[in-house]
Image: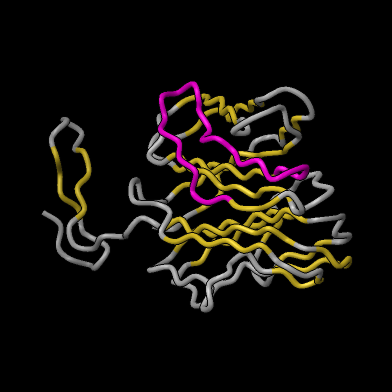
Amino acid sequence: MSQSLVQTSAEVVVTAGTSGSVTLNGVTAGNLLALVADNETDGVAFSAPTDNNGNTWAISVQGGNSTCGVSCIAQAQNVSAGNTTVTLAPSSGSKTYRFKVLEISGSVISGSPDVTSSIIEGANTTNHVSSADASHINPSGPCFVICVGSTSNTPGTKTPGSGYTTIANTLAFGHWQYQIFTSAPTNEQGAWSSTNTVKNAGVIAAFKAAAVTGGVLKNAGLDGRIANSAGLNGGMGA
């Protein structure tokens, strides 16, 4: 099943207080919600988000330090339908941070993310990656890849990596981007570049696409019973 970005929430900027919230309207049951966040003031990690719709949230990956701040990706799988208000807070204190929530269709409903990684760059540079692994990340199949970066200073003009789309934000420090891969990427690093030399605390997560099953597909009959129809492989319907 192909994945797609259904909608993106407004950007939440929290400059005082311990939590912020944003609402996605008309969320479809079974979809994936992914949160991207950036704490550009210190090294305090984020707590797992919560929402008003009974969904279970978990931190996919986060990392950073007091120089770069903290980058975070979190997810809720197989979500309930309806308007959903998501709340995020740092693990301690009253901090400055930004976040958005993405609704993604076509993802697996459990066992996600497929793979994650993170990096804290030790030197100022204009070329950045989101994974510290020697071979970067190697997802097992088609996937929706999200990268979040938090930088030590203003990066200037930011250019997403090849095939990536910037997740629009007003970040003074950092960069968010995503890419939908229709086949498994190899040694993916979530690269991006900046015109200013900065250090980057980057994280990357690959959310696996749901499998497309061949054979006989079953669809509800008009009388409420199950009727068989021809499968994707051209097999005979019954």
Quadrant of res 8: top right
The residue at 41%/51% (across/down) is 107
Answer whether residue 165 is magenta in the image: no
Q: Which percent across, then down, holds residue 232?
A: 27, 63
Image: 199 above or below 49: below
Instruction: Name the quarter where the C terminus is drawn.
Output: bottom left
The colour scheme used to paint the residues is secondary structure
The residue at 65%/39% (across/down) is 100
Q: What type of secondary structure mainly makes up the magenta span?
A: loop
Q: Nearer the viewer, residue 96 or 54?
A: 96
Answer whether residue 46 is magenta in the image: yes
Left or right of residue 8, residue 181 in this image:
left
Left or right of residue 226, residue 206 in this image:
right
Image: 46 above or below 139: above
Q: Which percent across, then down, holds residue 79?
A: 41, 35
Q: Which residues are magenta?
A: 39-62
